[in-house]
Image: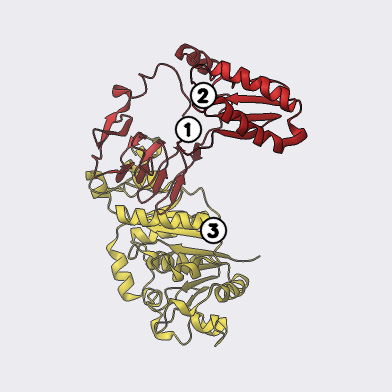
Chain colours: A yellow, B red
Amino acid sequence: MEGRIIVVTSGKGGVGKTTATASIGAALALEGKRVAVIDMDIGLRNLDVVLGLENRIVFNIVDVVNGRCNLRQAAIRDRRIENLFLVPASQSDNKDVLTTAGVDRVAKQLRKEFDYVIMDSPAGIERGFENSVTAADEAIVVCTPDVSSIRDADRVIGLLYSRSITPKLVVNRIVPEMVERGDMLSHEDVLEVLSIDLAGLVPMDEQVVIATNTGMPLVLQNDSKAGQAFRRIARRLNGEPDLPVVVPSVKGGMWNRFTQKLGLKQ
Amino acid sequence: MILEDAPPVKLKGVGDGFWVTLDPSRSEELLKNEITKLFERLKHLAINARVVIDVGDAPGGDDLVNALGGFLKKQFDVGVVTRPPEKRVIPVERIRQRDLSRGWTQHRSDVLMLRGRVRSGQNIEAKKHLIITGDVNPGAQIIAGGDVLVMGRLLGQVHAGRPGNDESIVLALDFRPTQVKIGEHVAAGLGDTTNGQVEFASVVNGAILVQDYLKSNPFGRIPWPEVI
């Protein structure tokens, strides 16, 4: 069976695309799937740092697309998580060195080699975005609960629809305390504007900063709320679409979850 | 209207006959000469043709038409000579009756009606009226030559009555646009709470005014439905 190519995109920068890519990729690999995470942010590569693999880069995606090496040479195998591979971006080139035709060709190869290919798209809707979505079968749009991020996500969703890709939404960096006080948009407010299927809700978590700086995949830390959320997102993508979405709450206790289920509380 | 330098007689083909437009202020002799010149060129086409002689509303028009009609029949064997059919003035009552019964059945509307969400970055232009059943997100732009009706949230930019139609309105069930233009008028930063009312924007005294639709009821005073 051919693998699925999922692009992680957002329009706006800094909303957590790279973290989401690394976490979802790692979580899918933990589920026993063969996963490649591809950094498409040519010139501004980050995914290798988040995954703690920056010291092992020899070749990159530009080399693969332009035929300077083959895919197996460029893919770095993660030593902590079996079946997780990273194809890093080039740090010295810019987005114009890739063409959609070249990416499509490599994508065909990636589909044969892996169960899941997660593409980390750069911010923006220009060439880099085009290259990332050209081969994608599915898309995950990441947004944070603020107006500017929602507007950019909305634009990206429109662009994805025009390419016949129906995206799913991840709302990242939810601060339940602020939502409760009314200082932050709730996920319902976000969904009201964007009106697409929800892949998951990720709470704000200090562990993300620690994990990013140490290069330790978030999903390996059992005490990380965000890591748990990404693991649930991965399960939803991987054949459990009906896994209930957990709304980040202040206490997160049994009582809250119980009342939520009963529909007594939003 | 007949211009000073217009020819005294004009001839054009209308359906199965001819339409002759005359300047009744000229002498009958001159008119006859001019008509002769024109009809001689028609040759056999004039035989048995229906001729309409239009002398406008000038007094004594009937006599002139009769005289010229006889002349044409004798000289060129034309068929029937008549004056133009009267333009019927339809009394208001009749218009109402007609509109209430079947006025819109033959009407082909210029309305663009869309269903679904208009997203940020999308641009929708309608030649005349635009109806969207769905929401218009912030960052979207919708433009119409006439009215804009949004059956949902209106959060984007909207321009009704482009270009220069100040009679247009913008109506939304949830009226919170980032910018409204009607014709040449612009309004920005309208209040962001509507308290659940249906509101509409229109140009009043040269400025855009947003009002509660049901309270001000802008079209309630039109006594019978009319096609727009």
Q: Residue at x 32, y 75 (%)?
A: A214
Q: Residue at x 70, y 38 (%)?
A: B41
**Residue at the front extreme, as displayed:** B29
- Residue that carries the numbered disc 1 in the rendered image: B2
- Residue that carries the numbered disc 2 in the rendered image: B56
Residue B71 at x, y = what percent?
67, 23
Res. A78 visible in picture: no
Q: First in sequence, mark 1 or 2: give its number.
A: 1
Q: What is the chain identity of the residue bearing mark 3?
A: A
- Residue that carries the numbered disc 3 in the rendered image: A163
Seen from the viewer's position, the closer of residues A189 and B95 is: B95
Give how far apart the Cα atoms at labels 2 and 3 are.
64 Å
Compared with B220, B7 (above or below) is below
> Mark 1 belongs to which amino acid?
Ile
Give how far apart the Cα atoms at labels 1 and 3 are.
62 Å
> Mark 3 belongs to which amino acid?
Arg
